[in-house]
Amino acid sequence: MRLWVRNNSLSLVFLLLFFVALVGQSFAGHRVFNEDQLQHGGETVSYARYLVSSHFGSAVLENWQSEYLQFALFILATVWLIQRGSNESKPPDDAGRESDRRQLVGPHAQENSPRLARLEGWGRRVYENSLIIVMAAIFFAAWFGQSVTAWTEYSKEQEEHGEPAVSWLGYLDRADFWEKTLQNWQSEFLAVGTMAVFTIYLRQRGSPESKPVGAPHDQTGTSG
């Protein structure tokens, strides 16, 4: 058990941090929601009811969709795009999908390679793109969930102010939706771009996200 925890400590720690942060957000959000309800003469809700509310759902999914968009775009972009000197980039000569020999697929698969890497045709095509497929699917699912929950919240506010309701498609054309969406996207794009540049010049000894401390600045795609 101790060995299993050690071998999976990175994912376990971040999953724990995720649940702690999510629970903390739910308690804080519940308090904010009820305070807002009291200020506007509405009824407060229980914690359990708040967890299935569009207010909580929209707040959670707003961040999820932007995070998975960041990863999906970064995974796809780094197939072809290069940042010389960055640890987040492949060496310039490796740009592109690379050869079957380099990717260990088909007749070049090793004895312990995944079974799907040995296949030909659509099965391998799906597997060799499975990371971007799953990341993109989670992004679109979270984006759709965010749009529906945010639309529900918006419609509720419209009703409270005596304004006409709008359809889901109508809401997607509103500035309210895109303001909430783009404020997350821009921060993710900035974080990825700066990370790619920072790893050219800055170091963290022992981290695979950094080059070796003594590596030259123009060395690309190596880990410490």
Image (cartoon, rainbow, N blue to C red):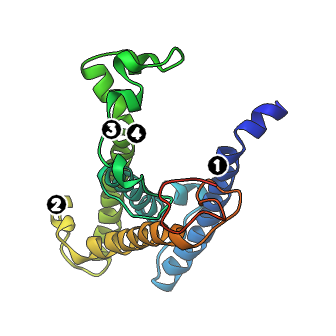
- List the single residue furthest toward the bottom: 39
- The residue where tag 4 is placed is 131
Between marks 4 and 2, how big is the CA–CA gap? Answer: 30 Å
Q: What residue do we see at 44% from left, 66% from top?
A: 192
Secondary structure beneath disc 1? helix
- The residue where tag 2 is placed is 169
Q: Please identify, in this view, whether the residue under mark 1 or under mark 4 is nearer the observer.
A: 4
Q: Please identify, in this view, whether the residue under mark 1 or under mark 2 is nearer the observer.
A: 1
Q: Please identify, in this view, whether the residue under mark 3 or under mark 1 is nearer the observer.
A: 3
In the displayed structure image, the side of residue 164 where residue 183 appears, left or right: right
Mark 3 surroundings: few (<14), some (14-19) or many (≥20) residues within 10 A = few
Between marks 1 and 4, how big is the CA–CA gap? Answer: 19 Å
Q: Position of residue 223 (x, y in %)?
A: 59, 53
Q: What residue do we see at 30% from left, 40% from top?
A: 97
- The residue where tag 1 is placed is 15
| Nearer the observer, 124 or 133 | 124
Secondary structure beneath disc 3? loop
Q: Please identify, in this view, whether the residue under mark 2 or under mark 3 is nearer the observer.
A: 3
Which of the marked residues, 4 or 2, is nearer the chain's N terminus? 4
